[in-house]
Image (cartoon, helix red, strand yellow):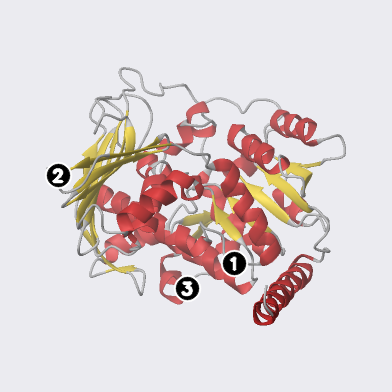
Amino acid sequence: MDRRSLLRAALGWTVGARAITEAQATREQSTGTRADQPIRIGLIGCGGMGTGLMKFAMANPDVRIVAVCDVVEERMVRAAQIAGEKTAMFRDFRRLLDQKDVDAVIIATPDHWHCVQTIAACEAGKDVYVEKPLSHNIAEGRAAVNAARRFKRVVQQGTQQLSGAHYRAAKELIRSGALGTITRVRVWNVWNDTPGGIGNPPDENPPPGVDYDLWLGPAPKRPFNRNRFFAPGYWFFWDYSGGFMLSWAIHHIDTVHWILEKTIPRMVMSTGGKYVLQDNRETPDTQDALIDYGDFYVQASIYHTNSRPIEGSGYGIAFYGTNGTMLLTREGFRVFPEGDRMKPIESGGSPQSEPHMRNWLDCIKTRDKPIADIEFAHLSNNPLHLANISYRLKRAVRWDGNKELIIGDEEANRYLCRTYRKPWGAYVYRHLSPQHRRYYRESDS
């Protein structure tokens, strides 16, 4: 190495070392802990997904699980046993957030809680990994973004496909122009829940060891019903989620936004219905949405009454280009050429959940934005909320992405927010954007 190269290398090392030192100082200032200490994590929501995410976090040597929280005592105790004997247990997430030895939280509660708890965690100075979908509605999603930015928190949505190496390879291939011009994309999840669906269990008393009122939280007071309370049932009730159009298609729309680098639609229309299933779900058993981005559109299909594969798969994303079509799933991707315009390409799958968790942990240290940053997550949730609004009103909606309002349709805009049961709506209200406050509602029950 000559003298000039040596100086360049030394300068590069110095700049890199300074950047690391500054990042460590930022983390110490943001979390109150030294950079060489482990990241101390609390788990809010100890069901199957929450426990799984906790295990992914625990697999990293720089992580300690210090607290767990759940309204179901049995789940909470089981998670604490997995985490270790010194793990603190809380039924109320607010008490967990009060703990000074918690740097960050994983939120894996039902969907109607995600934004409320994310905002509360940001206010408490905690970084957040929040399960998808980020929001129950568009206004609270923007409120959560506002809170994260105000309190300078690192917030990652659990759309782990973005961290898969083969998804990145697919993105690079499409961005290179190899598939030609993409004019349409299709995303789907199809299976057959007939004849019984989720059934019609009667209302009953909550099981022992369950704080049902705290589980309801910001949602309206309803009698306890197993389908409302346990996953996957609660996904199919408007009080808590938006059906699989929201809770599953978010993985696919999130990936499409990331690959095509376009996040704001101009119009959304959706149709469907509860045509076959006679269970007590409220959301449709068959639904299609067309999401128009201007120079391409996405067709999102959620079918619960017929499992015929689309493009040979029960779920996935298909990018249709002028040179070829790509089928992209968690197991890999395949490219089907248009004539001889390109060659067939095939790739296997790659881990997603583990690197997604690692990305969040690294960003807690560096204070960089994670790959599924809360702003990006919010923009990915919006088209699916709009699809459900269109479905419920039986008409298309035009979207102003800058104002985050539906154009010329005041009835549709009332779906941008919801009625919050006291006192939980206060978390959302104080971070709402001004244009959304008129649609906020509050109730005592």
Splitting the image into 4 quarters, where does residue 69 fall? top right
- How far apart marks 1 and 2 lie (CA) works out to 45 Å
| Residue 128 visible here | yes
| Front one among 317 and 303 | 317
Instruction: Give the amino acid type for the residue marked by disc 2 in the picture.
Output: Glu
User: The residue tagged with tag 1: helix, strand or loop?
Assistant: helix
Tag 2 residue:
338
Nearer to us: label 2 or label 3? 2
Crowd band around label 1 with a 10 angstrom C-alpha radius: few (<14), some (14–19), many (20+): many
- Front one among 161 and 155: 161
Q: How many marks?
A: 3
Q: Is residue 415 left or right of residue 363?
A: left
Name the residue that disc number 3 marks: 433
* Residue 430 on image: x %, y %: 57, 70
Task: Using a 10 Å C-alpha cutoff, classify the residue at mark 3 as few (fewer than 14 neighbours), some (14 to 19) or many (20 or more).
Answer: some
Give yes or no for contact between labels 1 and 3 (Cβ–Cβ under 8 Å): no
Q: Residue at x 83, y 57 (%)?
A: 37
Tell which residue pokes out farthest to the front in this image.
2
Q: Amino acid at mark 3?
A: Ser
Residue 396: image x %, image y %?
Answer: 20, 56
Q: Residue furthest left?
A: 339
On the image, the x and y values in percent for residue 423 come to: 62, 57
Which residue shows up at 83% across the image and 55% down it? 101
Separation of marks 1 and 3 at Cα, in angstroms:
13 Å
**Does label 2 or label 3 sit earlier along the sequence?**
2
Res 73 → quadrant: top right
268 left or right of 346 in image:
left
Pointer 1 or 3: first along the chain: 1
Residue 421, relative to residue 7: is it above or below? above
